[in-house]
Amino acid sequence: MNLLDLSTFLGAELRGEPEVEVTAVASLEEADERTLTFVESRRKLDEALTSRAGAFIVPDGLELPGRNVLVSADPRFDFSRAIRLLIPAEKISEGTSGQAVISADATVAPDVRIGPFVTVEQGALVGKGSQLYPGVYVGRGSRIGEDCVLYPNVVVMSGCTLGNRVVVHAGAVIGSDGFGYVTKGDVHHKIPQVGQVIVEDDVEIGANATIDRAALGTTLIGRGTKLDNLVQVAHNVQIGEGCLMAAHVGIAGSSRIGRYVMFGGQVGVADHISVGDGVMVGGQSGLARDVAPKSIVSGSPAFPHREWVKASMVFQKLPEMERRLRRLEKALGQGEDEGKP
């Protein structure tokens, strides 16, 4: 695409040669004369000046003399838009594979793309424009909205609902049984998990993530939430809209997560915890009690992030502090033998 057309699409100001064409995107280090890259701030200015890129998306006020630039109010966002334009999303072959098994009682829109070894059970619905990659399983009575993408070996168990434009990456399981048992004597008896899962519009679920169905009622993933790989959401959890959760997050049953919450990797949430809107939780933190809206917390158990930073600095100094304490006790004659005759 030439830079004039690209600038029009992005709504960015072009400073350079309008007929120059770019065919791909790349980092500053890997770019060449046919690629587009971006610079967010002056911290990357030296790298940009030595980059071979054919064009740059830059913020207003950042100068690259003699180079082709597209001036943007948000270079990272516009770069992501340019990627989608220059490198269209992959699609599987049109139509339904002869190796797929589609129940006669299922409702599948005519333009849905269905790969080999897909199974769509009785009473399921798959909306228009959706793609089911090889090995996908859609259980009885489940509903897949419009323009969804389910990558290879995704499992959607019975009675689950996915909204529109939901993306589920390879190996994820939606609607598996929640972890519920009652112990009588020496035997753990399973509590039937008969609830559902609802995934709202524009959610993205990472590879090998698991979202358990509710014991009763609903497990909910709110609109626009993004879950990374290997995230575990237990039964009856409610996650609000616009949340971001990095890999290995685990949320125990019946917890309530507010809107626009951010969890770093390996955050653990105990059961029946309430996390308010706008909370940010540092990686590997453990939430054992409710967290107020807009809090920033870290640690296990988690507490305010600034206090955690101070505490972690002290923690690193504990060995030296212990040595100093022992020397002080020895000097005062108050060591381990204090009080002995």
Image: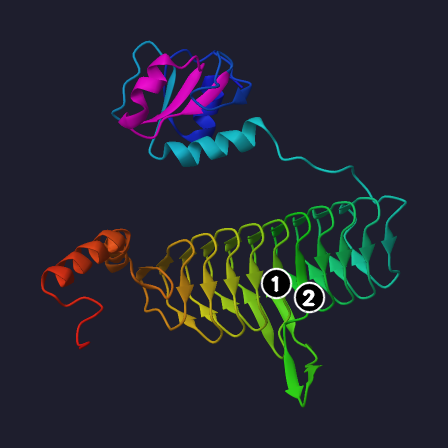
Packing grade of label 1 (10 A; few <14, some 14-19, many >=20) is: many
Magenta extent: 35-59
In this picture, is 113 found above or below 28?
A: below
Instruction: Give the image's coloring scheme.
Output: rainbow
Packing grade of label 2 (10 A; few <14, some 14-19, many >=20) is: many
Residue that appears at 87% across and 60% down: 103
Mark 2 falls on what kind of element?
strand
- Expressed as whole percent of the image width and height from the top left, the position of residue 148 reads 65, 50
Residue that appears at 67% across and 58% down: 173
Q: Residue furthest front?
A: 341
Which residue is tagged 1?
211
Instruction: Name the quadrant of the C terminus.
Output: bottom left
In this picture, is 280 found above or below 55?
A: below
Mark 1 falls on what kind of element?
strand
In this picture, is 17 found above or below 165?
A: above
- Expressed as whole percent of the image width and height from the top left, the position of residue 239 reads 49, 65
Which quadrant of the figure has residue 291? bottom left
Task: Decide if residue 302 is in sight here.
Answer: yes
Tell me if 301 is positioned left or right of 187 in this view: left
Q: Amino acid at mark 2?
A: Ser
Residue toward you, 167 or 233: 233
Which residue is tagged 2?
176
Q: Residue furthest left?
A: 332
Q: Are marks 1 and 2 in contact (CB under 8 Å)?
A: yes
Residue toward you, 131 or 263: 263
Q: Mark 2 or mark 1, which is nearer the start of the sequence?
A: 2
Q: Real-space Cα distance between discs 1 and 2?
A: 7 Å
Asked if residue 37 lies in the magenta stretch, the reply is yes
Instruction: Name the quadrant of the N terminus.
Output: top right
Which quadrant of the figure has residue 156? bottom right
